[in-house]
Image (spheres, rainbow, N blue to C red):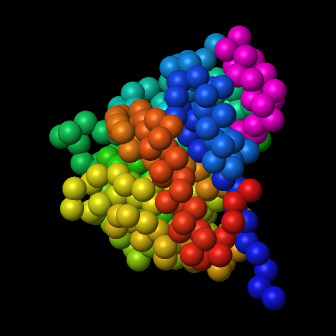
Amino acid sequence: MKQSVAWTLSGFGDEIDPDPAVQVAVLKALGARHIEVRSAWGVNVADLDDDRVQQLAACLAEKQMAVSAIASPIGKVDVALDAHLEVARLRRIIRVAHALQTPNIRVFSFFRAAHVTVESIRDDVMKRMRLLADLAEREGVVLLHENEKDIYGDTPERVLDLVESVGSPALRLAWDSANFVQVGARPFTDGYTKLRPYLVYLQVKDAVAATGDVVPAGEGDGELRATLTALRDDGYTGFASLEPHLAAQHALGGFSGPTAFGEAARAFAALLDEIGVTTK
């Protein structure tokens, strides 16, 4: 008898509604018992004060909702800025992560000015990511690098360069198929084998190569079916976090609303059903 495979479903709550109570209600209706926290009450996680953090923690505890990750904006700034500014922001976000009882913090690997080449920022990026990883190691958290377009680590090759060059157990990868599509990569074909050893978290969205438009899982060119099947076969048991971006997309995130978020969840569930994976 074939052993069943189950992944833990989560989702970006603020893609549903600014109010955490509404976020939790919709996620629970879709079968999720975890939430990824990017903002609450319209305030980014980096800017939540201690009172708001405690209010959020109490809300989630009351609803018996655990946190899969803090979707921080760390590294979504120009690499030319003082490196220690991001270290200080990460220190604050680690306090939020501890309060919400998750070790996982999503990060990025820095933007650059339009006239600056990606090759020229490599060393500065590595120094900054090493500083962030050092702090993460000391604080017992894991930085999940997301392959956002226009940062250093946006292509499979540079993501691999980043994670291997920093070489920290506190720096691992969050896989985003849609973002790979938007930089001209074929996610599974170009990236899966080389990046799988470091892949510990799945962001769920898809995109159309010709336009860059974000679409529900399986409806674009993100090679989702191949990627999910490979994850099933090589023993992945982690989080799958819905990040649909179906109504709006901007520098610090996106929005879907409850209806579109539900459509994205059902599209993902249909893909999983095809390959025999369940969620919990």
Q: Position of residue 18 (x, y in %)?
A: 53, 24
Residue 152 in the image, given as x and y percentages of width and height: 38, 49
Residue occupying image coordinates x 66% and y 25%: 21
> In this image, 235 relative to 219: left or right?
right
The image quadrant where one finds the N terminus is bottom right
Q: Is residue 36 shown in magenta?
A: no
| Residue 50 visible to an observer of this rendering | no
Image quarter of residue 222: bottom left
Quadrant in the rendering for residue 20? top right
Q: Main secondary structure of the magenta part?
A: helix
Q: Position of residue 90 (x, y in %)?
A: 60, 30
Which residue is most to the left?
115
- Residue at 44% across / 44% down in the picture? 260
Q: Position of residue 168 (x, y in %)?
A: 64, 53
Which segment is the magenta one?
51-69
Which is nearer the eye, 47 or 276?
276
What residue do we see at 20% from left, 39% from top? 114
Which residue is painted at 56% across and 19% down in the image? 41
Let me know if residue 59 is in the magenta part. yes
Indicate whether 53 appears above or below 112: above
